[in-house]
Amino acid sequence: MRRLVNILGLLLFTALGFLAVTPLFLIVFDVFGRGIPAIIRLGGFWEFLTSLPPDPYAEKGGIGPLLVGTLYMTALGAVTGFIIGFPVGVYIGEFRKEFFAKVARASVNVLVEFPTITIGLFVYAIFLLVTKDLNSVLVPISDWLSGALGDWVKQFIGPLSGFNAYAGALALAIIMIPYVALITASAYASIDQNIREAAYSTSGREFFAVFVVLRKAVSRAVLTAALLGTAKIAGETAPLLFTAFGNYYYAPFTQPTGAVSLWIWYAAQTPYDVQIASAYGAAAVLLLIVLGLFIVAKLATRQ
């Protein structure tokens, strides 16, 4: 009787596990099943990744400027979020008994559940307040660098408009911070006490013990935190509505900047078949990027 109950319990948990992952596989199969044929119909993989989005009467098109904007903002957001989130996570995990560490942990836990659209609104409000002062500094710097290096510098540095890639990257960085901080904190908190004591006794200084010796002990977890945080922000849409705003052409990053997620949101609402098809193709590309980051993160934890 006990063996029968055990078998029934295992079957039940297996069925529930299968039921839990079924929506994920359905989404993946649906996006790739519609997105890959759409990419082929719109001109092929390379043209789809480099050409401009299709207008309602076009037969071909792509996501070139949108992909560039997504990669640029995601890279900036990931680097900024990691630079801030990693030391915060170290502080929370290594000094978890201190009062401010507890406050920091509570804050990042709240930030994880925060609606991302409000983060976009917050960054938008901040840029409204500081854009004029920033431009008074950026304009002479941009003019000097463009005179020394060429006009291509103005694609990256110059007077900022109300919507720009850097505002979008800042919003993405704020979203990424708590994910990196919490995973890093858990990794540091799980270090064996003997290893911690050895690190402090051999390194001589607390800074080297925490950020050099102990970091090597949790390097895989830290790498995973960075990759998972990057995957999280790569597909964000809501915060970019109020920061990057969107653009369908190759343009300086100091101006409104396109993103793949913004194009999916817009094109899926249109009544035009070519734009709906491009939305499925864009979703397939974005899903491929996110799944790739998750696979790399999984492999990093195994090795």
Image (cartoon, rainbow, N blue to C red):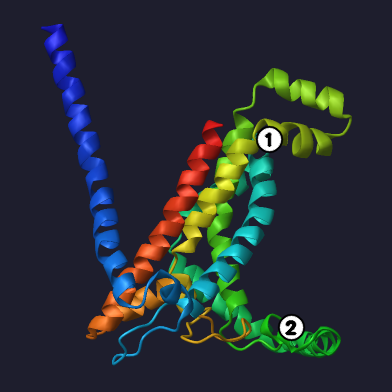
Tag 2 residue: 153
Nearest the viewer among 193 and 237 is 237
Q: Residue at x 27, y 82 (%)?
A: 274
Q: Residue at x 87, y 34 (%)?
A: 205
- In three-dimensional space, the C-alpha distance between marks 1 and 2, rounded to whole angstroms, equals 42 Å
Q: Which residue is drawn at 45% across and 81% down?
A: 51
| Amino acid of disc 2 | Val
Q: Please tell me whether mark 1 or mark 2 is closer to you in this view.
A: 2
86 versus 240 height, above or below:
above
Q: Position of residue 247 (x, y in %)?
A: 48, 85
Tag 1 residue: 94
Query: Mark 1: which secondary structure?
Result: helix
Query: Mark 2: which secondary structure?
Result: helix
84 versus 133 height, above or below:
above
194 versus 298 height, above or below:
above
Q: Position of residue 23 (x, y in %)?
A: 23, 50
16 versus 37 height, above or below:
above
Q: Is residue 91 left or right of residue 27?
A: right
| Cβ atoms under marks 1 and 2 closer than 8 Å | no
Mark 1, Cα crowd under 10 Å, few <14 / some 14-19 / many 20+, is many
Answer with the quarter of the image where residue 94 lies.
Answer: top right
Q: Residue at x 81, y 90 (%)?
A: 143
